[in-house]
Image (spheres, grey):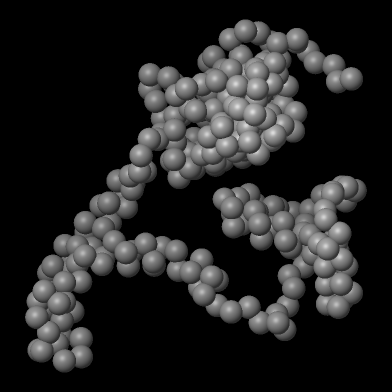
Amino acid sequence: MELRKNENEPIYDDKVKNVIRLLTEGIDREEIAKQMGYSNYKSLDMYVRRRNFHWDSDNQNYVPNYNRFEGTTLEDTIASTSKVAQVIALFSKEGADPKVIAKRLGYADHREMASYMSGKGYQWSSEKKNYTKSLGLVEESVAELETYSQADTRLEKSNDNIIEIIPNAKNISSEQVDLQQFVPLLMMLQKNKEKLVDMLTPQSDAGTIPRYALPGVFVTKSVHMVSPLDVMVREFSREKNVSQRDIFAAALLEFFRKYGYEREVEQLLNSK
């Protein structure tokens, strides 16, 4: 049995961590409850509350009952949940320092952390002194809007030049060549050029499987999977002459890159 420093200390078991992660991704409690086999969200709510969490209606997530106990250090607070949940949990503690929190979570500074939270759909609430979930559409940053505005201005000034480089431009009306409306789309495409190229480029069967020299010690990790998937891994390993360890490492890194952990992956690959 695991001993805890305080009977009111939050218990981050696998189910609680999964609930917090799914809520952070925007899935409602009813859907999560169904996924976990509960008849309704109230039964799930009772389970999480018994682990010393309470429902925060502003953040639409469960947060620890920090106001009910004392003596928890910043290190104790950092649990292996999603980065968003970690940030919110740390700011829930009285006297939280943004610079200290950013440093402990691996950000360059509190501004980078704020940018990360904004990208995940959270905004700072001066009243709550914490990040809260943005409702509705997440607006583009001021910098991006200014960039688009400047691009529109440049396009207006050079409208004649743009039309001149279009084949048979003389036969096209100004309404047909209203390119200004496409500037925001083109800016977005340029910003995500590398991702788009990866998505649109067919993968060759003869492609080289990446092998990563990752820092750290090797550990044994047991996982459960269905037998057809296990057979597929074994056959691929034998056919391509690549170890199962390399297969899982490459697959996990690709997964993390695709689902929001690009920065963490790059930090891992660049660390010595």
**Left or right of 229 on screen, residue 175:** left
**Left or right of 240 on screen, residue 161:** left
- The answer to whether residue 90 is visible is no
In the depicted structure, whether residue 44 falls above or below residue 272: above
What residue do we see at 38% from left, 22% from top?
126
In the depicted structure, whether residue 206 falls above or below residue 130: below
Q: Position of residue 229 (x, y in %)?
A: 81, 62
Q: Quadrant of residue 242?
A: bottom right
In the depicted structure, whether residue 55 falls above or below residue 71: below
Q: Position of residue 99 (x, y in %)?
A: 52, 30
As drawn, the residue found furthest toward the bottom would be 168
Closer-to-camera residue (176/160) = 176
In the depicted structure, whether residue 205 falls above or below residue 234: below
Q: Position of residue 152 (x, y in %)?
A: 19, 62
Q: Position of residue 223 (x, y in %)?
A: 84, 49
**Left or right of 103 on screen, residue 158:** left
Total numbered labels = 0
- The answer to whether residue 55 is visible is yes
What residue do we see at 35% from left, 43% from top?
137
Instruction: For the N terminus, give its image quadrant.
Output: top right
Instruction: For the C terminus, give its image quadrant.
Output: bottom right
What residue do we see at 79% from left, 64% from top?
247
Q: Quadrant of residue 85?
A: top right
What residue do we see at 21% from left, 65% from top?
181
Q: Quadrant of residue 169?
A: bottom left
